[in-house]
Image (tube, rainbow, N blue to C red):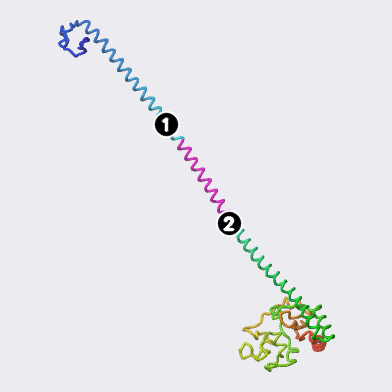
Amino acid sequence: MICFNCKRQIPDNVQNCPACGSPIIPQVQIRKEVKFRRFQRWVLYLVIAVVFSGMTAYAIKISTDNTQILNKFAETQNALNQTKSDLDAASKNLTAKEGELAQAQSQVSQLTEEQTALNQKTADYQKMIEEQSNLVKQYNDFKVDLGAANANVYAALVKLALGISNKDLAKIPVADYNLGSGVDTDKDGLSDVVEGALGTDPAKDDTNANTYKDKQEILNGYNPIGSGKLVFDSALVSRLKGDILLQVEHKSEAWYLSPKDGKRYFLGLPGDAVKALEKLNSATSTVQ
């Protein structure tokens, strides 16, 4: 039992509270204690209900939070997948762009090479123009020393003949005609004038010292100032057949490219070209 005066536990069936001395009436005490016990139970029930409600609310909150976390995780996962897909697409696009860049670089390189070749051709063309101008200047300079007849012959050759470089001239085979006319210092069958036109040494009968004389090599298609055979250009020969050619890089020696055998015939310096042409027409009239 409980003393409702001092709120202490007291033994059952006592008349007074041992602690405070308050009288104890059993019937009243029992009623009060029953009410008190009921009150305690309701308080306990209330506490349990509150605790249960709190736990339920907390569980609901945890569930809601978990659901939100799962949703956010799913959204993040989807975003990651989308990002990965975008990265893969970007990677493929980058690879394609790299291929296009490599192709563009190749085209630029090709254009650069073509531009270089074009520049070289332009330079060659300018050089040819300069050489032709020099040829005309040489004509004006030579008129003082040449007689009137030779000057006219030279002027006609300048107008009618084609200027050609030594490099291109070497691509045309040489005919055995008029090669020994004039002074031949080294006695190799090539006059000093011809050797000057061919680039060989007029003081040596074997310029490249390979035991073969210069004339023997040139007539057999070998290089008398280098090694190996000369490389002839059939397309160039076909294009220039019938033309008179002037060596613009030397003393303007004249050559005639015969349309009959595709060989070049030495005409000599411009002043001697007409006489050489007359003899050449007679010499080649029977060539088939």
User: Mark 1 = which residue?
Assistant: 65
Alpha-carbon span between mark 2 and mark 1: 50 Å
Q: Nearer the viewer, residue 149 or 56?
A: 149
- The image shows residue 12 at horizontal and vertical percentages of 17, 10
Stretch in magenta: 72-100
What x and y, as percent, mark residue 39? 29, 13
- Provide the major secondary structure of the magenta segment: helix
Which residue is at the far front?
Answer: 144
Q: Residue at x 64, y 83 (%)?
A: 229
Q: Is residue 79 left or right of residue 114?
A: left
Q: Looking at the picture, does residue 246 appear above or below residue 4? A: below
Residue that numbered label 2 is attached to: 99
The amino acid beneath tag 2 is Gly
Element type where label 1 sits in the image: helix
Q: Which of these two is toward me, 14 or 135?
A: 135
Q: Quadrant of residue 158?
A: bottom right
Q: Amino acid at mark 1?
A: Asp
CB atoms of marks 2 and 1 within 8 Å: no
In the rendered view of the protein, which quadrant contains the N terminus? Answer: top left
